Image (cartoon, rainbow, N blue to C red):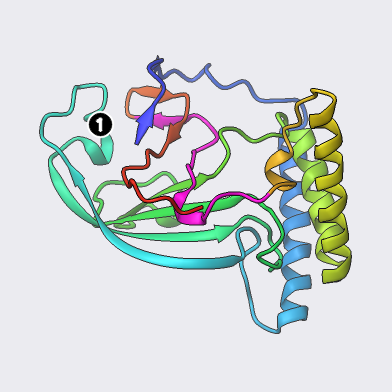
Amino acid sequence: MEASANYIRYSENIEVKQPNEDEINQKIVDSMARVNRLMFEKYRHAIRDAHAKSHGILKGELKIYDNLPEHLAQGVFSQPKTYPVIIRYSTAQGAIVPDKMSAFRGMAIKIIGVEGEKFLPDLAHAMTQDFLLVNYPVIPTGTINEYLKLQEGLEKQADSGELFQKIEQKVAVGVQNVLAAVGLADDTNILSAPGPHILGDTYFSMAAIRYGSNSLWRLRGKNKCKTSFR
C-alpha cells in the first residue's frame, strides 16, 4: 500500500467532533438496521447491513519486510513477519443489487495472527486486524449529515423493486452525460458509469487512519499486475 507523504503526528485534538455527531450516528445505525431487517424478510436469512453482496473470497500472504523506515515500522508492520490474509470483495449496499448496476465496491483485508490489544472492547484479544477499503478516494458526501441523507436514500431504494432500481440507474447515467457535456464534474460518476473489473480497480481507506504515533491521510492500493481486467 502507498500513503500520502504527509505524515501528521497523532494527538487527541486532530479530530474535531461535529455538532450532534452522536445523534446523527445513531440515525445512520438505525437506518442500516431497518435495511437489515428488510433484507432478512426478503431473503429469509441474515445478511450484512453494508457490503451485503460478496463477489469473491481470496487467500494470500502479507509479508512485512525488515527494512521499513521508522515511520512505517509501527503496529502490525513493526517486525518482519509473514501473515496469512483473507480478502473479501463486495458491493457496498446493504441490499443485494444486480451486478449490472454501478456501485461502490469494497475490498476487506483480514490479517490473521496479529497479537496485541485491539481497539474494540469486544475484540480486544482478537488475533486479527482488518483493513477496509473502497474503490473511491474519499467518502463523496463530505459530512456526516450528507452521509445520513445518502443512507436514507439507500434505505428507500432497498425497498424498491429491481426494475425501479434499473430505472434509477439509467437516470443517473443520463444526468452524468449531461453534466459531462457542459463541462461540469460530478462526484457521483462512479455510480452512473460502468467501472473496471473488480480485481482491476484501485481501493482506498477513504478516511484517515491512526498509524502508531502518526495519522495517515489515507491508504490506497497499488496494482502490481500488468494484466488488464477491463
Can you name the residue that lies furthest to the bottom here? 44
Estimate the x, y position of residue 73 in percent, counting from the top left: 21, 30
Q: Nearer the viewer, residue 73 or 102?
A: 102
* Magenta stretch: includes residue 214: no
Q: Which residues are magenta?
A: 194-211
Mark 1 surroundings: few (<14), some (14-19) or many (≥20) residues within 10 A = some
Whole-percent x, y for residue 215 in the image: 42, 24
Q: Main secondary structure of the magenta part?
A: loop
| Image position of 171 with respect to 80: above or below | below
Residue drawn at 37 percent across, 17 percent down: 5
Quadrant location of the N terminus?
top left
Query: Amino acid under label 1?
Result: Gln
Residue lying at 51% horizontally and 52% vertically, measured from the top left: 230
- Determine which quarter of the picture holds residue 176: top right
**Observer-nearest of 151 and 19:** 151
In the visual, does 173 lie left or right of 208?
Answer: right
Q: Residue at x 32, y 47 (%)?
A: 225
* Number of marks: 1
Compared to residue 164, the image places residue 79 above or below, namely above
Q: Would you say residue 197 sits in the magenta stretch?
A: yes
Q: Position of residue 118 (x, y in %)?
A: 37, 47
Q: Is residue 62 above or below residue 177?
A: below
Quarter location, residue 157? bottom right
**x and y percentages locating residue 51 in the rendered image:** 60, 59
- Disc 1 is placed on an element classified as loop
Instruction: Tell me the residue that label 1 is attached to.
Output: 74
